[in-house]
């Protein structure tokens, strides 16, 4: 497995946002194992589209990740999904924090 894109669509606990998409991009390269995270939020006024959320969050994970984790060993898909779901939980509790983090990386 060279690259793997994991996605999760969820509804943040905070009612300001309709839905959100989190992407984790896992890379194995020269005995380096990293996962990069990108997130996209859908405003309550907008219609949520999974495909668009996946594209935006995936691009952010690849171009300007808000968080990068490096692992000492190769990870299984199950372990990577566990990391993804922990991030979903963190983001859904405080989406504003992650919007600011993602915006800082993009600008």
Image: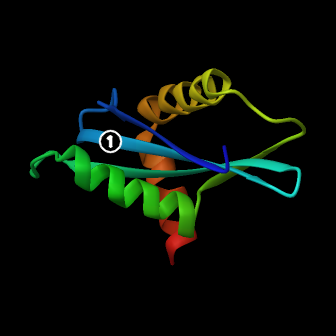
How many numbered markers are drawn? 1
Q: Nearer the viewer, residue 91 or 16?
A: 91
* Residue pictured at 36% horizontal, 60% vertical: 56
10 Å neighbourhood of mark 1: few (<14), some, or many (≥20)? many
Question: Looking at the picture, how far across and down is residue 71, in whole percent?
Answer: 83, 40
Is 72 placed left or right of 4 in the picture? right
Q: Which residue is more in the foreground, 83 or 31?
A: 31
For the N terminus, which image quadrant?
A: top right
Q: Which residue is nearer to you in this view: 76 or 55?
A: 76
Rendering quarter of residue 7: top left
In the picture as drawn, the residue positioned furthest to the bottom comes out as 107
Dot 1 corresponds to which residue?
A: 20
- Name the residue located 47 percent from the left edge and 66 percent from the top edge: 103
Disc 1, SS: strand
Image point 50% across, 25% down: which residue?
89
Above/below status of 102 relative to 93: below
Q: Image check: 42 left or right of 34?
A: left
Quadrant in the rendering for residue 44: top left
Q: Tell me residue 34's x, y (percent).
A: 74, 48
At x 24% / y 50%, what residue is drawn?
A: 51
Residue 39: x, y in percent?
Answer: 44, 50
């Amino acid at each position: 497995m060279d690259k793997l894109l994991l996605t999760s669509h969820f509804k943040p606990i905070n009612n300001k946002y309709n839905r959100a998409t989190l992407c984790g991009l896992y890379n194995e390269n020269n005995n380096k194992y990293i996962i990069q995270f990108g997130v996209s939020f859908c405003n309550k006024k907008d219609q949520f589209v999974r495909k668009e959320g996946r594209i935006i969050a995936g691009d952010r994970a690849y171009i300007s990740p808000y968080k990068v984790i490096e692992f000492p060993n190769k990870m299984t898909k199950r372990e990577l999904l566990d990391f993804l779901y922990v991030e979903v939980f963190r983001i859904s509790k405080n989406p504003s924090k992650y919007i600011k983090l993602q915006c800082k990386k993009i600008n």
